[in-house]
Image (cartoon, grey):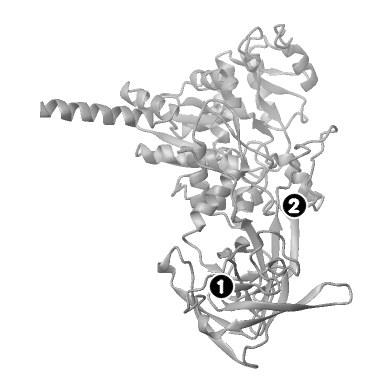
């Protein structure tokens, strides 16, 4: 009986384990069980033609996670087969991003351009097998001959050139005899195929371009659909995990590795891209924003490039949590940006100190506090995490508070400072508002109050309660800082694009607050250091512009969340 219980328990455990696996893992399990592969090897193959964004983070972490889960290997490989758009700057930024996310590629860094010789040899092999030919049609003519989804294509008049002629022409292409676009090498497959990708696709083109890696050695370059499967096969990738738009390209992927006669060829599996609401990920759009000076670079904190998220103050842990929550599926869907914000709040709330900064200051004077006296108060770094300890905060007669924390005429349910009301100064004393001063325009310039010396630490000895608690910074020791407040760069109400295809930009995506007051502890902040500014949100010291003599903090996220995790 006991044995039956144990078996039943193990069966239930196994079933739960299967349910928890995504469809890619189930396919890998099947391949391993059937002996298709005896190991797992994955790769992340970015094109160095721009900065990586949050969608790439999903692919990086998915591929790395699969290799790690199955005890396999993970490669980082640059798909640098198109020198017209590639830069060393992009290579360097991608390396930094992948390392930052924690995807360890150790000594497994590769460049597709290092395989150009092998790709050329594969092309020669196809020509010798009668599976490729040199074509003189222009790009427009090739497109016209290809047909469409309702009618088959027609064969190129150059399709039946002899093997010898094709070998000679292809050699001339390699040797720079022809101008750009004058000739191409095409695979010879099936012009009547229902899959347009199989209608004699171009696999090599002439391009007299300087390459960041191979310099001027080559003047012909392979097309992505030809190069990519060869790269995977050379590196002994077992599972080529890519996004859904490559599903229709899979027959061509399989054709290339089969006709090039690779043993144990890789298998392509597609998953759904991650679309995030109200953000810009298209490289063409970001490039224009940079060139037009609307953002200050590919790492502007309003963008969702990985570099931008890092600069804004997002952590690798928060990105990994976000990717886990999104999951892996076969159907495209959009993810609310609020989910990403939820993940960074969850990651920071117990890790980071909660310090005081006043973004819209007005002076508060405690009239009955001793003139010229300053004292030091010990205040916890984070009440929810005592392990962070405490810090010493200066306190005196004159303070700065948030302008919104005083109102001369009290609205309903307002519990902060107004004439006659008592509130708690966080970690300090109870104070009672006695009035205010105004300038000639009626703007409040100074708020006056009195304090109760018996309430040091923020609690009264007689047990009386206050409903409001406000933060503050001592005027005499306050440091100044610039704070940058961000909203989505896209106007959510108008949609991403207008009727002419231009971006609908949010004019309030960046608000610069040039002179905020911060407690002295914050003046120690180094690049990427992050904190909770009490009641104002989470902030990070900007890695590009912040200096000891001019501190700059980016707001990572506000404290309030509209996202709820399903339980």
- Which badge, 1 or 2, is on the more N-terminal residue? 1
In percent of the image, x 67 and y 41: which residue is there?
281
Q: Is residue 316 left or right of residue 470?
A: left
In percent of the image, x 42 and y 37: which residue is there?
66
1 and 2 marks in contact (CB < 8 Å): no
Q: Nearer the viewer, mark 1 or mark 2?
A: 1
Counting from the top left corner in percent of width and height, residue 468 is at 59, 67
**Quadrant that contains the N terminus:** top left
| Total numbered labels placed on residues in the image | 2
* As drawn, 171 above or below 522: above
Counting from the top left corner in percent of width and height, residue 388 is at 44, 69
Q: Which mark is residue 426?
A: 1
Q: Is residue 52 left or right of residue 487?
A: left
Q: Label 1: how many residues lie within 10 Å, few (<14), some (14-19) or many (20+)?
A: some
**Can you identify the residue that label 2 sits on?**
509
Q: Quadrant of residue 301?
A: bottom right
């Amino acid at each position: 009986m006991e044995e039956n219980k144990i078996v039943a328990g193990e069966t239930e455990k196994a079933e739960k384990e299967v349910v928890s696996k995504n469809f890619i893992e189930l396919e890998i399990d099947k391949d391993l069980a059937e002996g298709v592969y005896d190991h797992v090897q994955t790769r992340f193959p970015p094109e160095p033609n721009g900065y990586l964004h949050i969608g790439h983070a999903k692919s990086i972490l998915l591929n790395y996670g699969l290799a790690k889960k199955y005890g396999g290997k993970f490669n980082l490989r640059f798909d640098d087969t198109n020198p017209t758009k590639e830069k060393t700057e992009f290579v360097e930024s991608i390396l930094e991003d992948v390392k930052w996310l924690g995807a360890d590629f150790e000594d497994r860094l590769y460049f597709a351009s290092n395989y150009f010789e092998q790709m050329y040899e594969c092309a020669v092999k196809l020509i010798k097998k009668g599976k490729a030919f040199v074509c003189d049609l222009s790009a427009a003519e090739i497109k016209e001959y290809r047909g469409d989804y309702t009618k088959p294509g027609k064969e190129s008049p150059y399709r039946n050139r002899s093997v010898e002629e094709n070998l000679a022409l292809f050699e001339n292409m390699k040797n720079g005899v022809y101008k750009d676009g004058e000739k191409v090498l095409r695979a010879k497959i099936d012009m009547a195929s229902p899959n347009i990708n199989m209608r004699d696709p171009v696999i090599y083109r002439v391009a007299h371009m300087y390459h960041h890696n191979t310099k001027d050695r080559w003047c012909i370059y392979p097309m992505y659909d030809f190069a990519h499967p060869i790269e995977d096969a050379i590196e002994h990738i077992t599972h080529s995990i890519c996004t859904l738009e490559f599903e229709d390209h899979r027959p061509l992927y399989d054709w290339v590795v089969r006709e090039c006669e690779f043993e144990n060829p890789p298998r392509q599996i597609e998953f759904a891209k991650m679309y995030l609401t109200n953000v810009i990920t298209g490289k063409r759009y970001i490039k224009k924003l940079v060139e037009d000076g609307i953002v200050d670079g590919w790492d502007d904190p309003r963008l969702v490039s990985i570099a931008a998220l890092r600069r804004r103050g997002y952590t690798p842990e928060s990105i990994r949590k976000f990717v886990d929550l999104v999951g892996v599926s076969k159907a495209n869907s959009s993810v609310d940006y609020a989910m990403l914000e939820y993940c960074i709040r969850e990651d920071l709330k117990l890790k980071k100190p909660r310090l005081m900064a006043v973004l819209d200051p007005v002076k508060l004077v405690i009239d009955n506090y001793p003139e010229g006296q300053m004292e030091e108060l010990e205040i916890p770094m984070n009440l929810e995490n005592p392990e962070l300890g405490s810090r010493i905060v200066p306190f005196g007669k004159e303070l700065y508070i948030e302008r919104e924390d005083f109102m001369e005429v009290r609205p309903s349910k307002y519990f902060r400072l107004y004439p006659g009301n008592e509130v708690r100064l966080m970690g300090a004393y109870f104070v009672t508002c006695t009035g205010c001063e105004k300038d000639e325009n009626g703007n409040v310039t100074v708020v006056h109050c009195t304090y109760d010396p018996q309430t040091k630490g923020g609690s009264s000895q007689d047990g009386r309660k206050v409903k409001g608690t406000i933060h503050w910074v001592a005027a005499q020791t306050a440091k100044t800082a610039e704070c940058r407040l961000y909203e989505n760069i896209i106007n959510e109400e108008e949609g991403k694009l207008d009727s002419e295809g231009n971006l609908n930009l949010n004019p309030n995506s960046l608000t610069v607050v040039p002179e905020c007051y911060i407690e002295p502890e914050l003046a120690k902040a180094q690049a990427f250091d992050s904190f909770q500014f009490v009641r104002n949100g989470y902030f990070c010291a900007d890695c590009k512009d912040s200096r000891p003599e001019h501190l700059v903090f980016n707001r990572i996220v506000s404290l309030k969340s509209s996202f709820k995790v399903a339980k």
